[in-house]
Amino acid sequence: AKLLVLHGPNLNLLGEREPSIYGRTTLTEIDAALRATATAAGHQLDSLQSNAEHELVERVQAAGADGTALILLNPAAFTHTSVALRDALAAVALPFYEIHLSNPHTREPFRHHSYFSDLAVGVVAGFGADSYRYALDAALARLAATAA
Ligand code: DQA
């Protein structure tokens, strides 16, 4: 199946951005690990990082038409602000997993609300770069179950 990973604003800075919160692993390393795991399981994985809300909205819309089976999404700051990205996910009605490196619930109050969690299949937060790995693991299990 086709899987899509979307990373929101400032995640291009992973590795150097507030490492005490987000860790030292770079986005390139995260994407490479996800792609290797997905490929080994017989799937295709595409990924996009953008600092621009409209690019993420357009990629979600495209996913609705290009045969994407499932989305792994770290909306980053858009988690707490973007009705537009939420609406795009609702429009394409693809299953998605919400991912955060940090646990937003232990942080500032403005990070406690997500525009995505009530639509997500599940939310993985607080495990650093491993949050992506755990979410992919859950996604692969779901794909195996639905293909059977
Ligand atoms: C984040 C948490 C968000 O609150 C923050 O704006 C981010 C990253 C995370 O992965 O922990 O940019 O989504």
Image: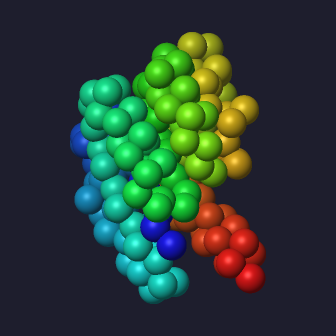
Nearest to the observer: residue 40 or residue 110: 40
Question: Which of the 4 quarters of the picture holds residue 112?
Answer: top right
Question: Which of the 4 quarters of the picture holds residue 51?
Answer: top left
Left or right: residue 38 versus residue 48 is right
Q: Is residue 3 above or below residue 116?
A: below
Residue 55 in picture, x, y percent from top left: 29, 34
Q: Is residue 117 above or below residue 137?
A: above
Q: Quadrant of the C terminus?
A: bottom right
Point 67% across, 42% down: residue: 120
**Count of numbered badges drawn on the protein:** 0
Residue 53 in picture, x, y percent from top left: 34, 26
Point 25% across, 42% down: residue: 12
Point 51% across, 53% down: residue: 71
Q: Is residue 117 visible?
A: yes
Q: Is residue 104 visible?
A: no
Left or right: residue 87 versus residue 76 is right
Nearest to the observer: residue 39 or residue 105: 39
Q: Is residue 55 above or below residue 31?
A: above
Question: Which of the 4 quarters of the picture holds residue 57?
Answer: top left
Residue 125 in picture, x, y percent from top left: 61, 44
Point 41% across, 73% down: residue: 44
Q: Is residue 147 above or below residue 88?
A: below
Residue 103 in picture, x, y percent from top left: 60, 37
Left or right: residue 130 versus residue 12 is right
